[in-house]
Amino acid sequence: MRESKEMRKLASYVTYRQLYNDGKNDVYTIISKFAENIIITQSLYSFGLTEMSEKINDQFGFCIPDYVIQSSLKRLKYVMRSEHRYTVDTSEIKMNADIVSNSMANSSNINQEMVNSLVQYVQDKTTVLSEREREKLIQCFCKFLLDDTIANGYSELISSFVIENSDNPDFKSNITEIKEGAVLFAGLNYNSNISDNSVWKDELVLYVENEILFHLAGYNGDVFQKLTEELFSLISEMNTKSKTKVIKVRYFEEVSNEIDVFFAKACDIVSGKEYVSAENYAMSEIINGCQNEADVIEKKTKFYRMLKNKNIFQEKDRNYYLDKEHKYNLISQEDILKYGIEEDKMRYITHLNYVNVLRKGENIKDLKKAKYIVLTETGKILKMASEFCENSGFVPLAINMGVLTNRLWFDLNKGFGASEFPSTFDILVKAKIVLSKILTESVADKFEQAKKRYLDQEITEEQLSDNILMLREEIKKPEDINKNVLENVLSFLSEENLAIHQSEKELLSIKLQKANEKNDSLMKSMKKNEEGKNKLIEESIQKNADLQRKNVELLCRNKENLEQQIEEIEKRKKNADKKIQKKISNIKPVTIGSIIFYCLFLLFVFLKSNEDIQVVITIVLAIIPPAIITIISLIVDKKVDFFNLYELFIKWIEKRIEKKTYSSYFVDKDKLRKLKEELAEVEAGLKAIKYSNEA
């Protein structure tokens, strides 16, 4: 069976890494060795540049820009260019010149053994794989090793396989060489001149999303914090070498607002007004150790102080919706529906829109000349950024930490001689992150299952609480995942539905209930006892208090959600109103000017005309205006004079402008009104509960 392109690519990266390690760390020299292999093994005597590019891609899986191959061929003394063709002087080819074939063959054998082990591992955990399933598994494994993507059909089993073999030195050495080769090759991506790895000269502004800032603060665990700190260390090193802050880190207003809401919710949780969802790492970390709201506010202050110390600031306010920049707008109702963007996640597409406006819609091929870019680990933002890009060779509007780390590492000429290199290059770290992410998503799904069953009255509040505690125990950060917990993790992921947890406390409660029933049957005659009555009254009061507390919690959550939606629409409405006001302010001068021009024109025509024409003009002016006013008066059923007619015209124009502008800014006044009415009802409900409690 012919070796798949994915498997050849793995061997190619190992060979690329070995050539680099052998002292041929000039990219053009390394690529020339792959071209030399093609020339020798395929006995080429002449070829075109595009032909060589296609052969290298087909044989090694490398998609290399033509200018790189063209420069690389100059390293081969026996290859001569004549017009648009290259010719080969075979007499000048040295013996044993092909150093690629042996390396490729050795690497392919090692990789095949590794893949066979993976297939066996997956079959042991599941069932025998068909040929098609085996091919898909190998394809997913190669993507796992080479790409920045996280999710694919076999992610959890591949991650588990990597962690299971983490103590195997041969396995670690092989996947490390593959990844390092991929990192070196990644230096060709979004790079218009690979020979220029000097310091960056053009300013680049990175707009970071919430998760990057939370990673940096350590709210999402040690692994994510280390990955982020390593990236910021490379940014700092590049700024130092450039002798200026060539890379600046900023965040948009929406990020700041969402962080403020996040800390406000943390205050509600420590006050007992809210609960923390099972899968929310960052929230659990923030409220950990907090006794009251003051402790949360202190953590928030510390968080913003950390950002300031690292020179991370909020972007200055500017209007991204000016008429002259409307052509760069990316936001459309079609894309909002296509990508399933909820009202509270509009920043996903909004921030990409901001960057496109700042770039003036320019397509850029070199990352260090991108000027502005979003830095995020949010899959939906990265997907949109990639699909908004007209060509895969252009720099997208957003990248993840891995892409930026790779490029800085390449341009700083760090190589792999150092004792340590960024964790983003470590496949074991990626495996832990992937498994942790999948586990978190599974916990979130099962948490929603439990909540739904509680709302459907299938389980009690006590059972819901027990299951939340159980689910929290299943959550694991990347640093918590190792060989010892793999079986438990895979077992949990294999359960499609949540098995309702029945605690010992509940079993004791059932036994106690049966005992009480027996006592009740023996003491029926004492049911009317005053003590029993008081107990029933107390229980009723307590039950009502509990119901009222839950009602308040529900109203508070509803209030927060409504306020967020109203704030987002009001923000867009504010921008729209500015545009409307600007247009309306021009209506009256234009209208008055038009009337004056019309009158002067009629006067000019009148004076220049003969007597017969003047008589006609006089009759027309005497009849038509009153006729128009009379017709309009009959339509509106009231007397209208000239000034009424002018006001009606102005109002009609204003309504047209408002309707069109609101539509382009996705402002729905009816929806806004209904949301405000709902908010007023919720606030009224909260006030009523407050007054009843005081009474």
Image (spheres, rainbow, N blue to C red):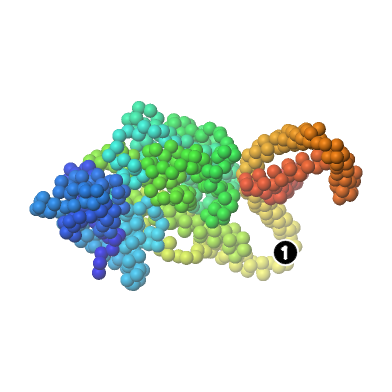
Which residue carries the number 1 mark?
Answer: 527
On screen, 80 above or below 140? Answer: above
Q: Is residue 607 visible?
A: yes
Q: Residue 28's spot in the image, x, y percent?
A: 23, 44
* Residue 598 in which image quadrant: top right
Numbered disc total: 1
Name which quarter of the figure residue 408 lies in.
top left
Give the camera-side residue of 94 and 602: 602
Q: Quadrant of residue 406?
A: top left
Q: In this orientation, which residue lies closer to the viewer: 79 or 476?
A: 79
Instruction: Look at 26% across and 47% down and name the residue there.
Output: 70
> Whole-percent x and y of residue 398?
44, 45
Q: Is residue 635 left or right of residue 505?
A: right
Q: Residue at x 69, y 43 (%)?
A: 657
Q: Position of residue 654 (x, y in %)?
A: 73, 42
Q: Quadrant of the N terminus?
A: bottom left
Q: Is residue 360 left or right of residue 560?
A: left
The residue type indicated by label 1 comes to Lys
Q: Residues within 10 Å of mark 1 (few under 14, many from 20)?
A: few
Residue 260 in view in this figure:
no
For this view, does 28 lie left or right of residue 242? left
- The residue tagged with tag 1: helix, strand or loop? loop
243 horizontally vs 174: left or right: right
What residue is drawn where x is 34% and y is 72%? 130
Q: From the top left corner, tell me how far across and down residue 485 is, in percent.
A: 36, 57
Image quarter of the C terminus: top right
